[in-house]
Image: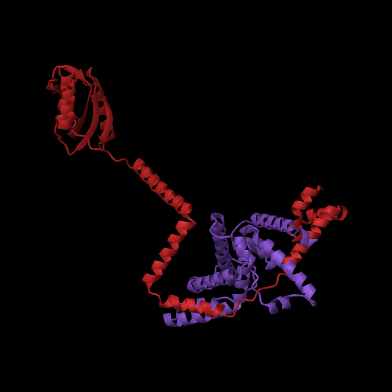
Chain colours: A red, B purple
Amino acid sequence: MRCEKVLGQLSLHIDEMLEENLATEISRHLRSCPDCDQEFLRLSRLKEALKCLQPVAAPDYLGDLINLKIQQARQESWQKLLQSALEYRWSRIKTTEGMWYVTRLMGALATVVFFVAISSAINPFYFTLANQMPTQIDWPRSESSMQFVQGVQQALGMPKARKMPVRSQEASINDEYLFHLSQSASLTDHNDTVSVVTMVDRNGAAKVQDILEYPSDDSLLSDFTEMINSAGWRPASQNGRAVDSRQVRIFSQIYVYN
Amino acid sequence: MNTGFSDEFTLNRFEKDGDELDQDQSLARAGVVFDEIFQRYQSMVFNLTYRVLGDREEALDVSQEVFFAIYRKLSRFRGQSSLKTWIYRIAINRASNRCRWWNRLRRRGTVSLDEHLGSNDNRTLSESLESAGTTPEEALLLREKRLEIERSLRRLPVQQRVAIIMRDVEGLSYEEIAELLQVSLGTVKSRIARGREELKRRLNGTLG
């Protein structure tokens, strides 16, 4: 057995905490190795010396001090107690445990973010889309910024910009069959509703992008999706040019043929 | 939880019929039980805190804190561990915290702990003589040796110091120490081994 290994185990050996085989091996080694034996002897002396440290007598007045403290605590009002507890906590935060509290706070924040993210992923919040998407967005412009732009344009000798009126027309369904179907009132007690977000591109092809409201009869949804995709559409136009546009289509009170 | 401590004194009788008593009676009883606890454990708590902190005044202060905490928490003590274990744990936690506090102050340079530790031996002459051998020379030598050991012990890192005190001074088993400090057995073993190694190195001349 090597000396380093024996020296590492001496502390446990002296407390008889080693398994029997290992203890026997170490004892054997100690008999044959004077250096290790010397170390063992020093360790025993240390242990003995520590054991012999004299107990220190508690002063007689310790009990009086504690009684005084207890009596003080009884007399103090809860406001004072709260104040001293807060002061104590604050001094701990200030002096010793600042980082501990910061990491706790960050952990709590991370937990809140995590749970909010998880819950919104399970039950996503849908924005209610307007039936018609705006064809022109009126960005708010302050008068002064407009004046500045006009001033720059004038200084550069540019012609004054004219405001172009935007003429636009929304996309519509050309397919009469689908149009009538979607507008038909229910004759039976079926009262299903489908509402979908449809993208009509500039070539007149439509595609269902999102389903906002599901019908109770699942087969209706697939039928409608198929019909929307295959129907003939007139694309939306803006200043005479065909553009892509998004629409929300609501088919309500659908009459179901047998 | 069975701790293995020989603690014949338990709060069972206090706990068992606590429900049937009205509040005043139970408070009065708590006072009696507290007095009993104080009489029984004051020297244990004071010794432990003194060994960990190495300063009589600090030990006195922390002992007061410990007993005040015991007084306040006594009604909530449900006997999951033995009373001795519970008191030990409070004392060790408070003393270790105080030690760390001192260490932090020292690191900030607010106070010199060495200077603080230098003036620690506040024992009376009679106490010193009592603890010593027969002749004054022997007494002096023994005293010097003991002081040297105490000084080296104080310079150990807190965790190692606590483990060494519990094992070699208080004579607790490794399992008891692990339970008290709420660490694994392996950690206790390594703390004790490292602490002893460090002490041996520091007390090179004293141990021979």
Q: Please state which of residues B207 and B108 is positioned toward the viewer in this rendering.
A: B108
Quadrant of residue A242 within the rendered picture: top left
Q: Which residue is at 80% across, 49% downward?
A: A3
Q: Which residue is at 57% across, 72% downward?
A: B60
Quadrant of residue A231 within the rendered picture: top left
Quadrant of residue B187 within the rendered picture: bottom right
Q: Is residue B17 visible?
A: no
Image quadrant holding the C terminus of chain A, namely: top left
Q: Which residue is at 73% across, 70% downward?
A: B143
Vertical relation: B17 (above or below) A212: below
Horizontal and vertical percent position of residue B189? 68, 56
Horizontal and vertical percent position of residue A134? 18, 29
Horizontal and vertical percent position of residue A127? 25, 38
Q: Is residue B55 visible?
A: yes
Vertical relation: A228 (above or below) B126: above
Q: Please state which of residues A89 and A130 is positioned toward the viewer in this rendering.
A: A89
- Side of B45 relative to A94 (left or right): right
Q: Please state which of residues A166 and A203 is positioned toward the viewer in this rendering.
A: A166
- Side of A126 relative to B46 (left or right): left
